[in-house]
Amino acid sequence: MDLPEWVDELWSELRFAELAARERGEGFQRLFQRVMKAADGESFLEVRPVGKYGDFKCDGWDTSSQTCYAVYGPFTRKTPDEVREKIESDLHGALRAWPEMRNWRFVHNDQAGLSALVAAALVSLRDDPDPAARHVTLLPPWGPKDLWWLLRQAPVDARASLLGTQPWSLNRRQFESFADAGEDPVSVSAGRSVAQLIHGFADGGLVAP
């Protein structure tokens, strides 16, 4: 008996949340690039630093929308001025390096949501843009939940490759034991939670083998 589609979806979401939570810095940037490649295919270009030239303030480029992505891990800067200065510097650096840019998007890995300092800096830049940046639209920022939404739209094979999972199934006896829990909603929910993890245990996952 094949595993129901909703079980695979839920397991995949948990797996992606675990990957996004543990990646920092360049690791999160690589995860972002893999998500975009899975979702957008050939229109997305991965950009990596090159020696003293760096990455031209761009962590990914979408050729169809001329969008430059700026990927950030947790900020160590503490004051509003320092945060704004960092984001503004990266935006203006991208403007100089990518004159054809028409959109710019901030991507972060904060599981709890964007911090007030960063949000305020982005709003300030959007509401009072530098004259040199007025032809560029500052798109809404993306976090881990937005990246998962993109990945779940990607082809099944591309998503499975990124998550490190392959199709797996329960036999009828196992599924009936865990998922057929009668009418009690708590038991049904608990049974389904167990069912979605059976055959899906992996080292480094949310649930240890």
Image (cartoon, rainbow, N blue to C red):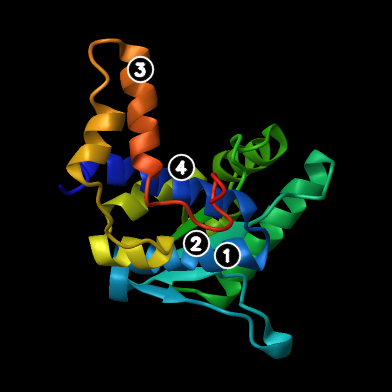
Q: Residue at x 62, y 78 (%)?
A: 55
Which element carries disc 2, helix, strand or loop?
A: helix
Which element carries disc 1, helix, strand or loop?
A: helix
Q: Is residue 64 visible?
A: no
Residue type highlighted by circle 4: Lys
- Residue behind mark 3: 187
Closer mark to the observer between disc 1 and disc 3:
3
Instruction: Give the percent coordinates (x, y) of residue 130.
Output: 61, 53
Residue type highlighted by circle 1: Gln
Going by the image, does 141 lie left or right of 22? left
Pick the front one: 64 or 199: 199
Q: Residue at x 31, y 31 (%)?
A: 178
Marked residue nearer the N-terminal end (1 or 3): 1
- Residue behind mark 2: 32
Label 2 crowding class (10 Å Cα cut-off): few <14, some 14-19, many 20+? Answer: many
Instruction: Give the percent coordinates (x, y) of residue 51.
Output: 70, 89
Residue extending farthest bottom: 51
Residue extending farthest top: 184
Instruction: Give the percent coordinates (x, y) of residue 172.
Output: 18, 41
Q: In 3D space, how far apart are the residues under numbered discs 1 and 3 (Cα atoms)?
A: 40 Å
Rendered image: mark on residue 145: 4
Residue type highlighted by circle 3: Ser
Marked residue nearer the N-terminal end (4 or 1): 1
Task: Give above or below for 59 relative to 153.
Answer: below
Q: Is residue 32 visible?
A: yes
Label 3 crowding class (10 Å Cα cut-off): few <14, some 14-19, many 20+? Answer: some
Marked residue nearer the N-terminal end (2 or 3): 2
